[in-house]
Amino acid sequence: MYWTILLIIGIAAYAASGALVAIEAEYSFVGVFVLGLTTAFGGGTIRNVLIGAPVSATWDTQTIVIVFLTLAVIVMLPLKWTQHWKRWGLFFDSIGLATFAIQGALTVKLIDGHLGLMLVAAMFTGLGGGMIRDLLAGKKPLALKEEIHAVLALLCGFYVWMDWTTPLQLTLAVFMVVTVRMFAIRRSLALKLPYNLIKKVEAQRLEEN
């Protein structure tokens, strides 16, 4: 039951994030629904293409209903209410990341228990929708700037590969992902490329020449 509730929250959170990014970009009503649908279904679509599964399988009735209800609520909300998303957005986005990554790994587990494929499925299911959303909004994909996204998605895939798939264990995984990501954001933890060091080395070479 807990896992089902978290999955519903994750789907709604990803759909809402797409809609609110569209509102922030001053897109039209159509843009709100396009970005909302893209964020909710983009990752699953990429995953199914990679594993050779029917793309239509991502469009199950329950998910479609959740997504459309979420988008309808977002569209009807007063604009000032949507500003609260900036405060809670990363928290709910983290739930979406965890639930989608786990769902991607579970989907592959039913077809093929290969670790590599499960890791790829977890990563693209968790990150794909958000990356497409950001690109459509003319922004740099957050998942490519904040590498904790990919690390946590891969860990979700490994978690499922270890067969820790009871509802309680999956709920614990979501809790851990949300906690780690929010801590990393709060502490500004990142594994950034050493651009300053690279530039310093290049400058020294130019001086020597």
Image (tube, helix red, strand yellow):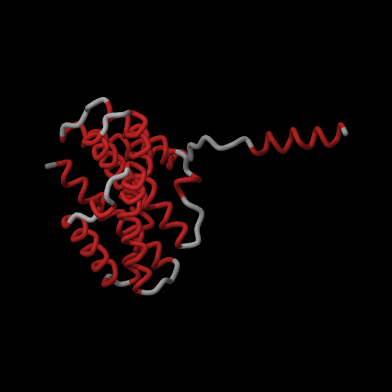
Q: Nearer the viewer, residue 162 or 86?
A: 162
Instruction: Look at 47% across and 43% down and name the residue there.
Output: 146
Q: Position of residue 72 (x, y in %)?
A: 24, 68
Instruction: Look at 76% across and 36% down and name the residue there.
Output: 202
Q: Quadrant of residue 76?
A: bottom left
Q: Quadrant of residue 35?
A: bottom left
Q: Residue furthest bottom?
A: 28
Split into 4 quadrants, where in the image is the C terminus? Answer: top right
Q: Position of residue 37 (x, y in %)?
A: 31, 61
Q: Position of residue 1 (x, y in %)?
A: 11, 42
Q: Is residue 196 left or right of residue 123?
A: right
The count of marks equals 0
In this view, 101 is above or below 25: above
Q: Is residue 149 left or right of residue 106?
A: right
Q: Quadrant of residue 56?
A: bottom left
Q: Position of residue 107 (x, y in %)?
A: 24, 40
In this view, 10 is above or below 76: above
Q: Nearer the viewer, residue 94 or 206?
A: 206
Q: Is residue 126 left or right of residue 9?
A: right
Q: Residue furthest left?
A: 1
In this view, 32 is above or below 88: below
